[in-house]
Image: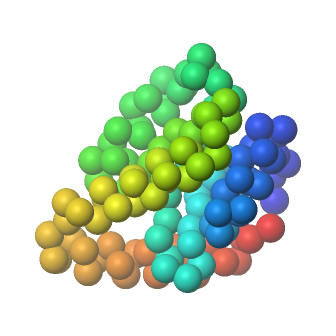
Amino acid sequence: MAKLVKSEEKAKKMLEGAGWKAVKAGWPDFIVYNPETLDFCFVEVKRTWNDRLTPNQSTTFPLLRKLKIPTVTVFLEVDDKHNIETIREAIKESWMFMNKKDFEAFKEIKNKLAGILHQYEG
């Protein structure tokens, strides 16, 4: 498992304290998922509002969202409750705009991803 920087360690504690599993992905920083519901979200961690996304992140994160893959940036200077709610809202929003065919395909992908992530828990 990749070594976490201090801000990532803090974020991982926050995420796991809310009942999520947080797997270090590298880009974005984490893939988090709920082991009971298998809901997941890509999470990029920034220390402050002044920390900016890289050019690659600025290009790719909107694309992921357009594909209905929940992707959020959390800021550690914001309270944990707000960051967790941001993740939950991103997941909820990603499901709201899917048609039935997309929904069924996404459920299958979600289950496969959970199986893969389970191997890398740490």
The one nearer the camera, 96 or 59, is: 96
Q: Which residue is located at x 52 percent, y 39 percent? A: 73
Residue 115 in view of the camera: yes
Q: How is the image coloured?
A: rainbow
> Which percent across, then down, holds residue 67?
29, 53
Figure quadrant of the N terminus: bottom right
Q: Which residue is located at x 35 percent, y 78 percent? A: 107
The one nearer the camera, 51 or 67, is: 51
**For residue 85, side relative to residue 44 (left or right):** left
**For residue 21, side relative to residue 92 (left or right):** right
**For residue 62, side relative to residue 17 (left or right):** left
> Which percent across, then down, holds residue 29?
64, 46
Q: Which residue is located at x 47 percent, y 71 percent? A: 39
Quarter of the image holding residue 122?
Answer: bottom right
In the depicted structure, whether residue 86 falls above or below residue 33 = above
In the depicted structure, whether residue 87 falls above or below residue 96 = above
The one nearer the camera, 21 or 114, is: 21
> Which percent across, then down, holds residue 94?
31, 58
Quarter of the image holding residue 119?
Answer: bottom right
Residue 22 in view of the camera: no
How many numbered marks does the figure carry? 0
> Which percent across, then down, holds residue 25?
65, 54
Q: Which residue is located at x 65 percent, y 69 percent? A: 19
Residue found farthest to the top: 50
